[in-house]
Amino acid sequence: MEKFVINGGKPLTGEVEISGAKNAAVAIIPATLLAEGPCILENLPNISDVTIGFNILRAMGAKIRTINNNTFEIDTTYVTEPVVPYEMAKYMRASYYFLGALLARFNRASVAMPGGCNFGVRPIDQHLKGFNALGADYTIDHGMIDVKAEQGLLGTQIYFDVVSVGATINVLLAAVKAKGLTIIENAAKEPHIVDLANFLNSMGADIMGAGTDVIKVRGVEKLNSTTYGIIPDQIEAGTYMVMAAATKGNVLIKNVIPKHLESITSKLVKMGVTVEEYDDSIRVISHGNLQRTSVKTQPHPGFPTDMQPQITTLLAMAEGTSIVTEGVWDNRFQYVDELRRMGANISVDGKVAVIEGCGALHAAPVKATDLRAGAAMVIAALSAKGTTEIENIHHIERGYGDIVEKLQHLGADIKKVIIPDGAELKQAL
């Protein structure tokens, strides 16, 4: 078993460099299947989701060459079978992006139902609706999704019933080589969707409107190799912003796009935190007591659902009563029981959490219930005086590269420890 051990109560100070965006990387890696030749991806984050994506490609016959820690050459020329088995897909929700990419390349795809974080039903009905509109039939049998377009994919008009990041990405991947024009309406507008579209356009795709709610894709016959740099990770940046605020710190967060952080910045400012914006960096300074506020997560450009556990943790340390409403997922408050172990006063009713600020949290053993909940546990542990041990850190490492080293550089007392299986049970006996 691996754990993070954190001695909290120390302000974070100094500079931290933000990695490439996880949510962009996990879409762009499958998209390399569409290139006729090798692609070079720069600014890839050092996280397990990227490693899993690479492992899936290798298992399919792709060749991946390391250029440096964050730059890789991916050659999918020799991929012949459009299949992603369960043993590989179960570790990563974004494995379903291989459906759209493989469908565009082979006119068929077989991918296991995705894994990843478990905080509510993640239907793929909008993905399948989009594929069906493009001319593909599908079946779901024994956990495998099989999609086929025997006559090839044809451009069409698609309206999503709900705004879905995953469906927008999957249909975008499938449509780039479909014959004719595809119009995607009620599309998601997140920065990583724009990044994927820019990547595909750099290969020769014809995509317009990414970042708005209507995306137009004119299909092309072939896509070329390219070299492309991933955008900075909006959620990693936001997490470090909250870490600085929670610890009464002063942190310069580098390699960011401040516009992507506006919804997070505005909430921190309302809570009494000083945020200074520069061209590609942002400084967060916290002193004095944190103030209450209300937050509702929404699709971009609203407050991101992936920042909900982090901001809830910060509000648990504020003065007064705050309300957090989850507007995207059904069951994203599973981590609240862990925060209560650290002294948080939070009550949850469905998608709404009422937080009675307690001023300070205290150290306790906790676990990460999912990726962003794990980040919330790290925030709580950094702020709380005493020693906190966090279990299930594999969730955290799915989305935060080099987190121990980055926090140590900011003055945090954190280490990763490996405890042999059964050692804790023996100690208890």
Image (tube, rainbow, N blue to C red):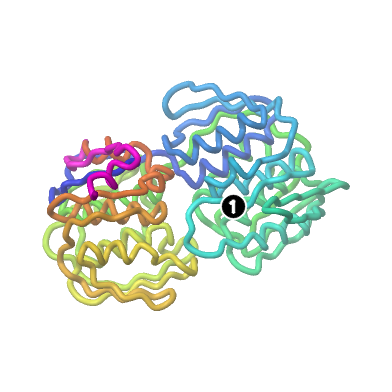
Q: Is 367 situated left or right of 171 in this image?
A: left
Q: Amino acid at mark 1?
A: Ala
Where, quadrant-wise, is the N terminus in this rendering? top left
Q: Please say if 280 is above or below 241.
A: above
Residue pushed farthest front?
Answer: 429
Q: Please say if 87 is above or below 305.
A: above
Q: Is 152 situated left or right of 339 in this image?
A: right
Q: Which residues are magenta?
A: 409-429
Query: Residue 349, image x and y in percent?
Result: 39, 78
The one nearer the camera, 167 or 300, is 167
Tell me if residue 416 is in the magenta stretch.
yes
Q: Name the residue rendered at 56%, 33% in the picture.
A: 55
Q: Name the residue rendered at 38%, 58% in the picture.
A: 307
- Residue 219: name its quadrant: top right
Query: Residue 379, image x and y in percent?
Result: 26, 53
Q: Please say if 6 is above or below 78.
A: below
